[in-house]
Amino acid sequence: MPVSQENFNKLGRYLENGHQLVRGIKAIAEDQMPPRRYKGEELVELVGAKVNTIYMAEKEGRLPSPDLDPNTHRRLGATLEQVLVMQEYFGTRPWRRPEEAAVVMSFTNFKGGCWKTTTSWYAGSYYANLGYRVLFVDLDPQASLTYNCGILPDFETSHEQSLGPYILEEEGFPASWAKQVIRDTHLPNLKIIPSTLQLAGVEYALSNAIMEARSESDRLSKMMHWFHRVKDIVNEVKADFDIVIMDGTPSLGLLPLNIIFASDAVVVPVPTEITDFASTLSFGDLYKDQSETLYQTFGDDVVLPDMLFLPTRFSASEKTATLGSEFVLEQIRKTFSTDCMQSVIKKHEAVVSNLSLMRRTVFDVNAGDANVNREARKRAMANFKTVFDEILERAVYPRWPSKKAVLEEKGIY
Ligand SMILES: Nc1ncnc2c1ncn2[C@@H]1O[C@H](COP(=O)(O)OP(=O)(O)O)[C@@H](O)[C@H]1O
Ligand SMILES: [Mg+2]
């Protein structure tokens, strides 16, 4: 069929409708989602002080007075913002010590749909809800993490508001200014450097830069420079945070490679499904080849992250003889041995998709909010908590001498 201008006009109208819909959904989420409130046991654990001690401090004005239900005059529970104030007052913040460095991590695999973005998002939300200062760095042009954090990609972000120009060292964008593009989210201690579609162009520009560097006399140092752009920038912005989580595309392009080099720890989500397990092995092969070549070329200048393998998409009910989740999980454990995590991410379809619509994680909502089944919420919270606590113990605390005591207590060290 011959194409006419009307084809493009029609597509334009469809897209405008779609964009309006997305903006509408965003507005609903912003209006309707109440903050999570902590009370009772949860509050005690989070603040590290007894309920009566907290109440007394509130009564005596050492802490702000609590929010009360206007009708019943009962306590509503503390928001995360109020919890952070209490942690500061009681000296129970979980923060790293000032002389310790923020831990930078990423969930990486070149397989799409193995829950990288969602797991990054849930991890950041979990750590922020414990009181850590968390920074997301979105480097996926598809910008799902940006969207999940309440920022509409490309409408509310642009090339200049992403890491793009800093990575490419455009004039007027030195790495030391990258702090400017950090944005707020609905949680006071969770920030994000958003993404934009134009990061796709950054991937091309980076490969051109590497190609050019190859023909130059100081090519080794030039190439190292372009592999470490994200690391150099993250080093400039991480001082105000405890944990930095980066999200990228499912490929082994130069941006994802930059993410790997910028990470202290890379968690590789491995779906417990046989085809995806196979492609994870290919990812491993490619990564091994590339990093080995780099090591042979650059020697000790190449610092590689710790790797942990995290089984995902686990569904205990899928026990279909040989190809079920259980079977593949066993193979993953055998293959990656001690670098395989003990915990696995299970399927929580209803919870994750209902909450995605509201741009909230299970850690951001109260029981009964957003039509999420209470039992399913509890199960999802418990599962994610196990996974993210294991990441804390294996990838974060070992880098903070002040937290080693926590590990020793548990007999891990
Ligand atoms: N634990 C989970 N349980 C159920 N569905 C999930 C879970 N984690 C992610 N999903 C869903 O899987 C899909 C792909 O996830 P996503 O995180 O975008 O993958 P990736 O970033 O690896 O491409 C999304 O629709 C997401 O809602
Ligand atoms: Mg993704």
Image (tube, helix red, strand yellow):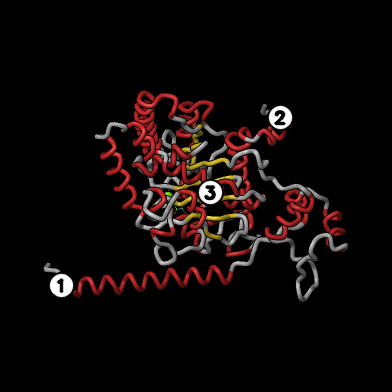
Identified by mark 2, the residue type is Glu
Query: Does residue 298 appear to the left or right of 150 in the view shown?
Result: left
Q: x%, y% of residue 256?
A: 39, 42
The numbered disc on residue 237 is 3
Secondary structure state at the residue bearing disc 2: helix
Query: In this rendering, is residue 388 above or below 81?
Result: above
Identified by mark 1, the residue type is Ser
* Ligand 2 lies under 8 Å from the Cβ of mark 3: no
Q: Camera-side residue: 176 or 119?
A: 176
Query: Does residue 238 appear to the left or right of 85 in the view shown?
Result: left
Q: x%, y% of residue 165?
A: 39, 53
Q: x%, y% of residue 370?
A: 58, 64
- Residue at the disc numbered 2: 408
Asked whether disc 2 touches disc 1, contact meaning CB atoms under 8 Å apart, the reply is no
- Residue at the disc numbered 1: 4
Q: Residue at x 53, y 45 (%)?
A: 346
